[in-house]
Image (tube, rainbow, N blue to C red):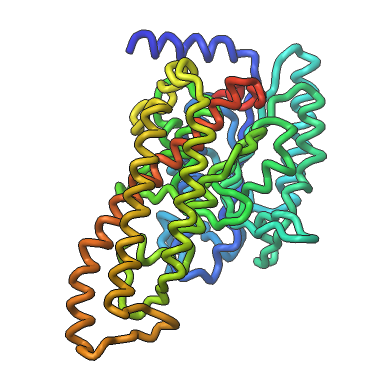
Amino acid sequence: MVFIVASFLLFHSVYADTLRKAILIGGSCEAGRPRNYNMYHNSLASQGKGLAKRGWEVSIQYGGPNERCTNFFNCSSRDPERTSVDSLLKRSGLKTSSVFMNTENELLKQLELEIKAAEAAKKDGKSYQLFLGINTHGAQEVEGKEHEICFSKPDGQNEFIPVSKLRPYLKRLKDLGAKVGVQDNSCYSGSTVKHLGDLGCVITNQSSNRVTYNGGTEYSFLELLEKDSWFDMEEVFLKGIIWNKVANYGYFHSYIHLQPMISGFVETKNPADTMTKILSPENTNIVSGTSSPSDDLTINRCEEVIQGMKNLQAFSEDILPGLKEYWMQRRLEILKGETVKAPKELVKEIQIQLKEYNDLFQEYIKLSKERNYSYQSSTVERDESGILANQIFDLWRIPFLNRIKDLKDNLNHNIALARAYDYMAQRDEKKISSECADFRF
């Protein structure tokens, strides 16, 4: 404990001549949604408090007139503790002058001020560090349209702005020698790595083709902020990949829903995308153990799952054996508190799980064919025994589906861990720069 505190104090003494500024934006596009609170209120307040405690100068851009209320009395039907600006100030410990409306113009004005501050710091022989935290809704990048994030307008409307619009400002900071860190927790945020990743450290809570769920790097960042030791953005990313519990709620987080990304990381293979196909909307109910006779579940889809298993088998055989054990020994401390395994152990376990998974689905197909029982277009095909046969079949399905669910949770964790190991191996081979490991809090 003494060593940890001493390291923390040493770190802050080394960074005494570093000006550190955090701009946290979010809370827009929340009006009209079926909830009585702003879903980004908690993250913005907790991030602001944690960063300020560590000596960062923090400003927050929070929603627009339709996404927030000022105080308890004008919150109408919304929960003031999770919506109002007063609550945000109280929970973050920030002053009123540090909280602004989340508009595009306000962010660009703030970035211009940071550029001037970085210029002044350079003249004074000091270093400068900017962290931009994005906690808002995002739009998917498609052909002819970039990944965009939501801002509010003063008139109460919302607008989506391409993240690349921030590039000229962040580049000027980088050219001044400033360290730039960006964390994008919006949906489809993986594209932010492509547009801004060469300007500093960029981590995202999701890939470019999926919506974001609570958990991952968003909550690993909050968890690390609460500790007394320093940490870096690489640690946020690695813990975010394999984190299995949603903060403050305590229920299991499904690893398959999130695929955090980071600057410079090009996955050798993409096991998470393979798992997404296996657990696609058409297949997800059987694997989660919640399917019912009305589900559109067919034997063909079971066979798709089996093909996905073969893809994962190839991943475990091609990638994991090449990982260096000594790298794991150096970095296991980062993942302390998580379920970690040595690479060889992980290979063996994944291969066993894949065989079990494959056998379960083969068994399902066999029994389905024997009973002439399948679900197609929400129509149940029954044999001559009618409802009785259906009930007997469902009794058999319950333990079968429970076995699949348990296996799925364990396999998803191992696949997530494999992604972390893939990143570690590339860092070890110096295919990825140390910018994220050097961006510290």
Left or right: residue 424 compared with residue 396: right
Left or right: residue 107 compared with residue 390: right
Q: In front here: 114 or 287?
A: 287
Q: Position of residue 346 (x, y in %)?
A: 39, 33
Circle count: 0
Left or right: residue 396 compared with residue 201: left
Q: In front here: 394 or 4?
A: 394
Which quadrant is the N terminus positioned in? Answer: top left
Q: Residue at x 48, y 56 (%)?
A: 307
Q: Quadrant of residue 174?
A: top right
Which quadrant is the C terminus positioned in? Answer: top right
Q: Position of residue 163 (x, y in %)?
A: 72, 49
Q: Residue at x 48, y 46 (%)?
A: 312
Q: Residue at x 38, y 86 (%)?
A: 379
Q: Position of residue 147 (x, y in %)?
A: 70, 54
Q: Position of residue 358 (x, y in %)?
A: 37, 54
In the image, residue 265 above or below residue 388: above
Q: Is residue 83 visible?
A: no
Q: Is residue 271 visible?
A: yes
Left or right: residue 52 compared with residue 408: right
Q: Residue at x 59, y 14 (%)?
A: 15
In the image, residue 70 above or below residue 321: below
Q: Quadrant of residue 149?
A: bottom right
